[in-house]
Image (spheres, rainbow, N blue to C red):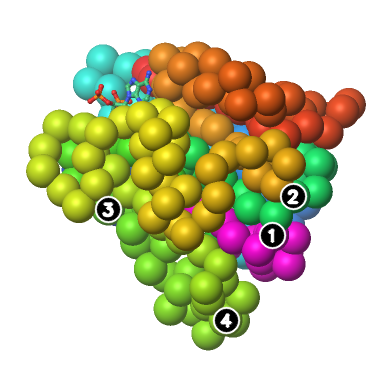
Amino acid sequence: MAAFYEATVTDIHHWTDRLFSFRTTRDPAFRFEDGQFAMIGLEVEGRALLRAYSMASPNHDDGLEFFSIKVPNGPLTSRLQHIRIGDTVLIGKKPTGTLVQDSLLPGRNLYLVSTGTGFAPFASIVRDFAVYERYERIVAIHGCREVAELGYSKHIIDAVLADEYLGEAAAGKLIYFPTVTREAFTNTGRVTTALEDGTISAKAGLAPLDPAHDRVMICGSEAMLKDLVVLMKFRGFREGSSSEAGHYVIEKAFVEK
Ligand code: A2P
């Protein structure tokens, strides 16, 4: 049995010269939990060239969506960025990952902290109905270099709030905090700084970060993860896993090539 499904590209959107998202068909047998990732890629010279990608679409979606960087010389993304509607993409059959609800203890507020393409798993989670039943507030934080790079997360959040059903579930609960580091914007500076100095909690009308009531999911660059783990530990948060639920979970934003 092959280790992957063949899916057909149904939509592509280029957000900037570094970022794009695309949709594919979904084999009905492909099951995953919101927040998980799978190996996906292309057949190149008769061989499967695969990288880890978070599913950006929610499990209830009939199709699949992915959010990707474009690296000029990256073995996969230099090719993947040129896909067209109707092309075939390979989807690994074994989704996995730590950004799942079972790895977190029950809590009041859920912070989803991302940089760059690290927003992908959260695009899935903010479109999950159950998350709005589980938490009082969901704070979706996305840090990028430039405003244009926030296009995908803004589009997703706007679509959730405008959706007839999801919008009702998310109303008053979903808070979006976009920030950029390399140009002027409403919010500027790194996500780590805005979390540490209390800017985000204050803007969301929430008490300072505290493991007593807050849960945190983190996805982004290695440097960002490293810095945030220091902050989490300092505040008394314990990392969760599939074997023992905790106060926060982390995952690297995978595709860098
Ligand atoms: P900066 O402009 O200061 O490097 P990238 O596109 O390189 O993945 O970066 C995405 C965002 O992550 C940028 O805003 C970048 O800020 C930020 N960033 C880089 N390193 C860290 C870090 N250690 N902690 C928090 N944010 C970071």
CA gap, disc 1 to disc 4? 14 Å
Residue 52 image position (x, y, % from top left): 55, 27
Label 2 sits on a secondary structure element that is: loop
Q: Nearer the viewer, mark 3 or mark 2?
A: 2
Q: Amino acid at mark 4?
A: Glu
> Above or below — where is 36 with respect to 42?
below
| Residue carrying label 1 | 135
| Residue carrying label 2 | 107
| Residue carrying label 4 | 168
> Above or below — where is 113 with respect to 41?
below
First-in-chain label (4 vs 3):
3
Residue pushed farthest bottom? 164
Q: Amino acid at mark 3?
A: Gly
Note whether ligand 1 is within 8 Å of mark 1.
no
Task: Name the side, left or right, on which 92 lies relative to 167.
Answer: right
First-in-chain label (1 vs 4):
1
First-in-chain label (2 vs 4):
2
Q: Amino acid at mark 1?
A: Tyr
CA gap, disc 1 to disc 2? 7 Å
Label 1 sits on a secondary structure element that is: loop
